[in-house]
Every structure is written in structure tokens, then in C-alpha cells.
Amino acid sequence: MKNKKLNQLKETHLEVINDILLDLPELLKLIADRMVKITGADAGIVLLLSDDGKNLISRESFGFPKGFTEIKIDEGIVGWVVTNREPCIVPDVHKNKNYVEWRVTNVRKNNRGKCG
């Protein structure tokens, strides 16, 4: 009986995973939400590589101002992460030499942390 219930839970888990994987926007939303919760950041954004490979395009965000759509692949802290292929956590973005202000008018000035 116990094995049957475990197998049912496993099957349910796999069905949920398959449903999420088939729905890219929902998966990206989940990633943004979890990324912010795990790191304790006040905002997060998921960027995907453009077709031409020159830009990173915003696909989902959590707690991030609307209006930002893309950044050049070698620009800012995100560009550093892509270029170096290493994750980083920046406690205060304003003190990081790679920081660039997002090109939107409603960015919060108290945004401090960034994770790549």
C-alpha cells in the first residue's frame, strides 16, 4: 500500500513538472519568484538570449519595474555574468563597477542587491 501511494505521488509530481515545462511563461514566473525568495532580494528578472545573440530580453520579473525589455549582452552586472559564465551575488549594485542604471523611468533608487 505504501509503495502504491509513493508511486502515485511520484506520478503526480511528474505530471506537474510536465505541465510546467510545457508552459514556458509559467516556468519563468516560477523561476523569478523562487530566485527572489531564495536570495532575499527585493526584485528579480529572467532574461533570455535574443535570436541574434546580441541582447538579453526580459521574459519575466518579480518585483521589478515594468518598462525594461532588453540589455546588451555585455552590459552591466548581467553582462558580466554572461561573459564570465559565473553566478554572482552583489550586495549593493550601486557600488559595483559593472552596474548600469536600467533604461526605465520608474526604477526604485533603493534597489541594492542583484543576483546573476
Image (cartoon, rainbow, N blue to C red):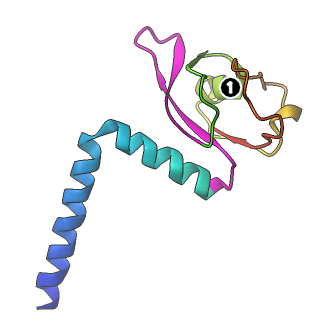
Give x and y (percent) for residue 59.
46, 29
Left or right? Give the position of 43 relative to 98: left
> Which residue sits at x=77%, y=21%?
100
> Which residue sits at x=27%, y=54%?
17
Give x and y (percent) for residue 36.
60, 50
Out of 63 and 54, give the one closest to the viewer.
63
Left or right? Give the position of 99 relative to 103: right
Residue furthest to the right: 95
The quadrant holding residue 106 is top right
The quadrant holding residue 64 is top right
Out of 64 and 99, give the one closest to the viewer.
64
Where 25 sits versus 20, above or below?
above
Give x and y (percent) for residue 21.
28, 44
Q: Look at the image and tell me in which quarter the N terminus lies.
A: bottom left
Disc 1 on helix, strand or loop? helix
The quadrant holding residue 37 is bottom right
* Residue corresponding to mark 1: 80
Left or right? Give the position of 80 relative to 14: right
> Which residue sits at x=80%, y=42%?
112
Left or right? Give the position of 45 relative to 12: right
Q: Look at the image and tell me in which quarter the C terminus lies.
A: top right
Was residue 6 drawn as part of the magenta stretch in this picture?
A: no
The magenta segment is 39-62
Give x and y (percent) for residue 12.
19, 66
